[in-house]
Structure formats: structure tokens, C-alpha cells
Amino acid sequence: MTKAISRPTRGFWCGLLLMAAFAGVAVLLAQLPLFKETLRISPLIISVLIGMIYANTLRHKLNLAWVPGLAFSSKRILRLAIVFYAFRLTLTDIYAAGLTAFVYDLIIVSSVLLLGVLIGRWLKMDRDTAILTASGSAICGAAAVLGTEPVLGASSEKTVIAVATVVLFGTLSMFVYPLVYATGWLGLTEHQMAIYTGGTLHEVAHVAGAGGAMGDAIASTATITKMIRVILLAPYLLILTSVLHRGGRGGATAQRKVSIPWFAIWFLIMICVNTLIVYLANQQGMSDLYSQICGGIRWVDDFGLCMAMAALGSDASFARFRQAGGKPFLLAGALYLWLTIGGYCLIRLIG
């Protein structure tokens, strides 16, 4: 394997640097007031859009020797970034949100995933596309889609299609939720609205944007509720692997599905490690120092995720979108209705 990777050394690094350049542009653009304050679009989304623009303009001129660098970004860097995403979370986050938030998230995630599979079958959709779309809606948007992709072994265009649905409906909710809450039509308390927001919006950035528009009290609880959904990503991936293995039909397919998503296990381990380090840092009076270190880790991690998103977008042409048709967006729309309407009924019931 080492020998195979070492042959196109120069092309490999060129491809890797190209994705790093795309990620760098996305990070810079995300700091502009238009994207950061008005639209509140995360660098992840900008990265995939940059990649898609490249895929439909200059990708045909790409030197084939550079392709391994793109593949490395969309596979290896992706999995490593998912593992280090855990440095945003601690076990304390779950406790702080309370039992209501945990139960609410568990019901929302489970129901959306189940509905995604059932509606996908009813629409006669490709299995991988349906699962990727449901994962993004149920758990944590693009990060969940990226985490699910290597477990399924799905093609890059299916991943990008699923991410596109997250962009569409998640961004819509980010603007609609504060507007509807301001009218008072929902009749929810601040605590209920916070759990409803964190439990039903797609991206962490969407939750931060909507929560910030409704006040600090809602924003903090909504973010913690969202983080619980993020934590559920790891057990979900392990369960998904087990289900796919049981559903394997022999041969190479069954062999691929039996592989364990070690990055998901390491994700859980790193949450525990981060919890322990935070505790020790607080005990030793070094919490500020560790917060700065974590800030650096998160920045690098975000950059790695941006590289992965750019690489995925670079392999997504509009021709592939046309081939996929409108079914993924119909599925995402149905799940969106369940998130908004079903989620509202649920918070009124248990909140």
C-alpha cells in the first residue's frame, strides 16, 4: 500500500493542496458579514459549493495524478476530522440539558431515520441516498452525512445531494424559527423553544443562528440540545453497521459491510477523554489554557472537514444531480415537515 501511494507523490500533494486552497477560501468567505452575520452559512457549506463550482467548470482539466489527493481528503481526512469533532463535546453537556432534551433528541433522531428509510422505499429511491438524506436531517447535518458515507461506502455524488438537502431546509428553518417565535403563535416557553430548535434544526450553525436571534437563554440550551444529537452520531453509526451487516447478501458486499467504523468508536472515546481533560483542567486552574488549545483543535478540525467537503463537491457535477432527480428533495421535504410539525407536537407533549 505504501508503495502505491508513494508513486504519485507530487500529484498526491498537489491534489491535497488544491483541496486545502478551496478550504482556505471557504474559511475566509465565511468570515464576511454576508455569510457570518446575515446568512450564517458555515464554512462547510461554502466548501462544498466551491467544490461543486469547480466540478462543473474546470474539473475536466484536472491532472489524473492529482486525484489521489482528492480521495485522501474525502476519505482519510474526513474520518480523522469526525473523530476530533468530539473536542466540542463533553458528557456534562448531556447532563446540563436535562432528561427532557435527551428524550426529545432520541425520539426525533429515531423517528426521522425510520421515516427516511420508509419514505425512501415508498419513493423507490436508492438506499444509500435515502439513508444519507435521513442522517443529515436527523442528526447533525453535513457532519452526519459525512460520517455515514464511509459506513455505506456511498458514492460522492450521493453524499453531495444529501448535503444539498441540508443546506436548503436547514437554512430555511434558521430564518423561519425566530420569525414564528417572535409572533408568539407557537405558545412555547423559552426552555421549550430552545429544545425544539436544537432538536429539529439540521446544522450546528443553523441552531446557533436561530438561537442567537431569539436570545442568549434560548441559544445556550438549544446548542446543548444540538450537541446531544451530535453525540448520538457515534452509536447511530455502530447500529447502522450492524444492521447493514445482517442485511448483507454474501460476497464482496457482505465483506465490506462487516467492517467496523472505528472512527465512530474513537469519536465516543474522544468525548470521554475531552470530558476527563476538562475536569482535570478545571481542578488545576488551567481551564483557560485548555479552552485555547481546544479552540486551535477545533479550527484545524473545521479546516479538515472543509477539505473533505470541497473534495466531495469536486466530484459532483450537475449531470449527476439531474440523474438523481427530485426524489431526494421530496424525501428531505417530508422529513422537514415531520421535524417542524412533529417536533412541535412532541415538545408540547413532553416539554
Image (cartoon, rainbow, N blue to C red):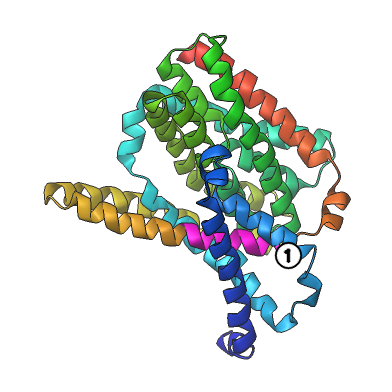
Q: Is residue 193 left or right of residue 173?
A: left
- Vertical placement of residue 314 versus 127, above or below: below
- Quarter of image, res 185: top right
Q: Main secondary structure of the magenta part?
A: helix
Query: Is residue 25 or residue 336 the one in the foreground?
Result: 25
Please report the residue visible at 63 percent of the width from the left and 32 percent of the height from the top.
Answer: 112
- Quarter of image, res 299: bottom left
Q: Label 1, on which residue? A: 54
Please report the residue visible at 73 percent of the width from the left and 64 percent of the height from the top.
Answer: 54
- Residue 266 position in % (x across, y down): 42, 57
Q: Is residue 350 left or right of residue 118?
A: left
Observer able to see residue 113: no
Q: Is residue 96 left or right of residue 214?
A: left
Secondary structure under tag 1 reads helix
Q: Residue furthest left?
A: 284
Q: What kind of residue is marked 1?
A: Tyr
Please report the residue visible at 49 percent of the width from the left and 61 percent of the height from the top.
Answer: 303
Q: Residue furthest front?
A: 33
In the image, which residues are magenta?
302-314
Q: Is residue 313 left or right of residue 227?
A: right
Residue 49 lies in the magenta stretch: no
Q: Quadrant of the N terminus?
A: bottom right
- Residue 215 position in % (x across, y down): 41, 25
- Residue 330 position in % (x across, y down): 79, 34
Please report the residue visible at 86 percent of the width from the left and 57 percent of the height from the top.
Answer: 319
